[in-house]
Amino acid sequence: MLERYLTAASSYAHSIDQLFLLIAVIVGFWLVLAEAVFIWFVFKYREKDGRATRHITGEEPELHRWITIPHVLVILCDIVIIIPAIMLWYNIKQATPPIDRTVRVIGQQWAWSFQEPGPDGVLDTADDIRTVGELHVTVNTTYRFELMSRDVLHSFAVPAFRLKQDALPGRTITGWFRPNRLGTYDIQCTQMCGIGHGLMAGRVIVETQQAHAAWLMLNSTPPGTGQPAPSAPTAQGATVAEVRR
């Protein structure tokens, strides 16, 4: 089960992992230090016969350093965390790289539907491919996604990509990802969206250029035929939802 969280399959997954590691090391250091000092105080200042209890107000000058010095050090550690966090947020959420393809992701109770361009590479044309529960993408290709919800609040999450974005009814939210590792990866909904929330699963399949081109030709509708594109098989156990336009 942990493999889905340990696998890094997108261009920014390792950067997010490094930020979490930085936070874990800094916070973990202060946790261990604080608990060690606390336990030391418990034994050092425990009740002893013949020693009077001392009332401490916290205003004594010699005790100020126990508050001031750790306070300053914690603020410095916060700065060490905040600076790379802001830089990472900007690189992922603000500075969109050149886009190769665009896909549409639609959440509804209780399935993920996808629309992606056919062989012409353009979305909203006759050869578009629509699938439920399964998204096919090409490795080392930068994708822009258009995320929307048909009913309630959902959250599109691909743990292996370190991607999580809420889908809000009435809004189209955009983002991007660049898969850099071949394989099949879980898609989850991470917002409680109703009784079938636990069944709202899917998968993203990262393919080579050749494999993806073959899948496009097999599933797209040739212009002028008027026939719907055959959908790829849904992920095992996924709920099939009706797609309404």
Image (cartoon, rainbow, N blue to C red):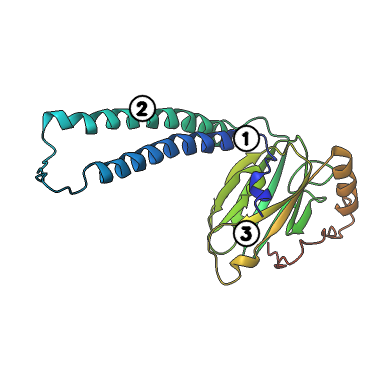
The residue under label 1 is 14
Observer able to see residue 109: no
Q: Are marks 1 and 3 in contact (CB under 8 Å)?
A: no
Q: Nearer the viewer, mark 2 or mark 3?
A: 2
Residue 30 image-quadrant placement: top left
* Amino acid type, mark 1: His
- Rounded to the nearest angstrom, the CA distance separating label 2 from label 1 is 24 Å
The residue under label 3 is 107
Quadrant in the picture for the C terminus: bottom right
Does 77 sit left or right of 148 as displayed?
left
The residue sitting at the bottom extreme is 195
* Residue 222: x %, y % from top left: 89, 51
| Mark 2 residue element | helix
Residue at horizontal 21%, vertical 43%?
A: 45
User: Residue 76 got which mark?
Assistant: 2
Quadrant in the picture for the N terminus: bottom right
* Residue 73: x %, y % from top left: 33, 28
Query: Relative to the observer, which residue lies in front, 50 or 218?
Result: 50
Query: Relative to the observer, which residue lies in front, 137 or 149?
Result: 137
* Amino acid type, mark 3: Gly
- First in sequence: mark 1 vs mark 3: 1
Observer able to see residue 47: yes
- First in sequence: mark 2 vs mark 3: 2
- First in sequence: mark 2 vs mark 1: 1
* Amino acid type, mark 2: Leu
- Seen in the picture, residue 129 relative to 18 is either above or below; the reply is below
- Seen in the picture, residue 229 relative to 212 is either above or below; the reply is below
Residue 101 image-quadrant placement: top right
